[in-house]
Image (cartoon, rainbow, N blue to C red):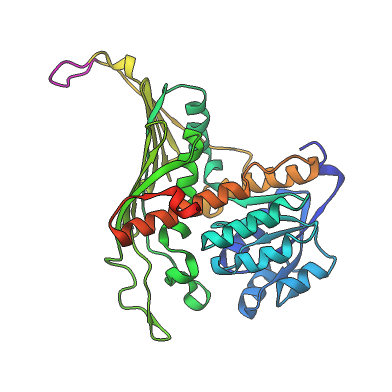
């Protein structure tokens, strides 16, 4: 941070639900910023956010916040299906913008947002924080440095609890979220692209709503979020990615496991243990025809970032991302996570849902047009 001490940035929070308040918790301890304004139509959410930022001025809509002159930066943490409308207004200003994942719920909204973003000079940062989780980031850095050789296989397993309730139960419906593989998994598709340095060409998926929310009906509508899926991604280089998602796996010890395998070795990170494991194929000798390897070993380490002042719900990743975003604003450097990242991560999720619905592989170009 070259210039962070020179200016205190004023942040406006658009959307004061659970994720909006999580952003405030990070900003409170980061330094160099102040939460000066909060916007949300839901009074209990505004009141809860005001407890965290008591000096902030509150608004019931984002347009009034943008017109107030109180903010240099906005963080958008509203329901997914509202992002496009809010971004239309935010991106027409010279205010720095951070938008939570997923970017939007339809590919047309994503394309419109990208067009608006490309027409402005101010920074726009896409909130995809998983790449900043310390053990995951270590795997990304080491894979990029060639420690596993040519990468052929990337897999992510998340076995976790169901979605928790949100205001008006908006996260119970595919129409409002974009679907589970957009809402929850855009992070993972972005990680796969990041480690491989390319986008997938073809997506295959199988998934369903088998356990969660089967008895939940709101305003006569049955909750319809799928709760488990396998998704396979083919890349032009010949590499493959796979997501294994289960949202009724509360008893899992390691809830998220990220694995990268190449022709020279394997890297793996696990959360919440923060472990990173690394092994080289050469350390294990040449396997016999019966599959018996030599007497090799693995490097096992715990990876933490001691500079993180607030771990929160994302193992410190949101804090690290906010520091990077703040410093990019102050130093005039580009966003490390772009709207283009947001578009592709949503498109892959939409392709996966289309594959489930149609029972066939779906080309990414079919979604992007």
The residue positioned 35% from the left and 23% from the top of the image is 298
Q: Position of residue 361 (x, y in %)?
A: 32, 50
Q: Position of residue 154 (x, y in %)?
A: 38, 36
- Image coordinates of residue 309 in percent, x first then y, are 63, 46
In the image, 225: left or right of 132? left
Going 43% across and 63% down the picture, which residue do you hit?
179
Q: Is residue 15 visible?
A: no
Q: Quadrant of the N terminus?
A: top right
Q: Nearer the viewer, residue 90 or 143?
A: 90
- The foreground one among 283 and 343 is 343
Q: Is residue 249 left or right of residue 100?
A: left
Secondary structure, magenta segment, majority class: loop
Give the residue at x 32% y 20%: 297
Who is closer to the viewer here, 43 or 348? Answer: 348
Quadrant housing residue 48: bottom right
Which of the two residues, 362 or 145, is positioned nearer the viewer here? 362
Report x, y in % for residue 87.
Answer: 67, 63
Instruction: Tell me the magenta residue range.
Output: 287-294
Q: Is residue 265 visible?
A: yes
Residue placed at 65% from the left, 78% from the top?
A: 41
Q: Is residue 27 left or right of residue 213?
A: right
């Amino acid at each position: 941070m070259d210039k962070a001490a020179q200016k205190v940035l004023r942040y406006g929070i658009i959307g004061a639900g659970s994720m909006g308040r999580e952003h405030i918790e990070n900003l409170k301890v980061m330094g160099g910023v102040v939460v000066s304004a909060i916007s949300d139509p839901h009074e209990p959410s505004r009141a809860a956010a005001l407890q965290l930022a008591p000096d902030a001025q509150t608004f019931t809509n984002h347009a009034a916040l943008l017109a107030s002159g109180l903010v240099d930066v906005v963080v958008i943490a509203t329901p997914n299906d509202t992002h496009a409308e809010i971004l239309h207004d935010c991106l027409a200003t010279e205010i720095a913008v951070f938008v939570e994942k997923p970017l939007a719920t339809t590919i047309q909204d994503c394309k419109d947002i990208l067009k608006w973003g490309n027409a402005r000079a101010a920074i726009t940062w896409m909130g995809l924080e998983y790449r900043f989780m310390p053990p995951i980031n270590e795997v990304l850095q080491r894979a990029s440095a060639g420690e596993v050789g040519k990468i052929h296989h990337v897999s992510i397993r998340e076995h976790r609890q169901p979605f928790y309730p949100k205001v008006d139960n908006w996260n119970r419906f595919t129409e409002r979220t974009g679907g589970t593989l957009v809402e929850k998994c855009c992070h993972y598709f972005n990680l796969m692209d990041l480690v491989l340095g390319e986008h997938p060409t073809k997506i295959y998926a199988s998934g369903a709503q088998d356990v969660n929310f089967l008895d939940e009906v709101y305003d006569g509508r049955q909750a319809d979020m799928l709760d488990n899926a396998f998704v396979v991604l083919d890349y032009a280089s010949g590499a493959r990615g796979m997501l294994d998602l289960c949202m009724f796996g509360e008893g899992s010890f390691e809830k998220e496991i990220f694995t990268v395998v190449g022709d020279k070795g394997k890297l793996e990170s696990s959360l919440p243990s923060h472990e990173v494991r690394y092994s080289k194929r050469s350390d294990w000798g040449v396997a016999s025809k019966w599959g018996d390897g030599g007497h090799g070993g693995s490097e096992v380490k715990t990876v933490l970032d001691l500079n993180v002042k607030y771990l929160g719900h994302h193992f410190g990743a949101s804090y690290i991302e906010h520091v990077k975003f703040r410093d990019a604003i102050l130093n005039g450097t580009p966003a490390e996570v772009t709207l283009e990242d947001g578009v592709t991560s949503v498109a892959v999720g939409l392709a996966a849902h289309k594959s489930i619905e149609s029972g066939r592989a779906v080309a990414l170009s079919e979604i992007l047009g």
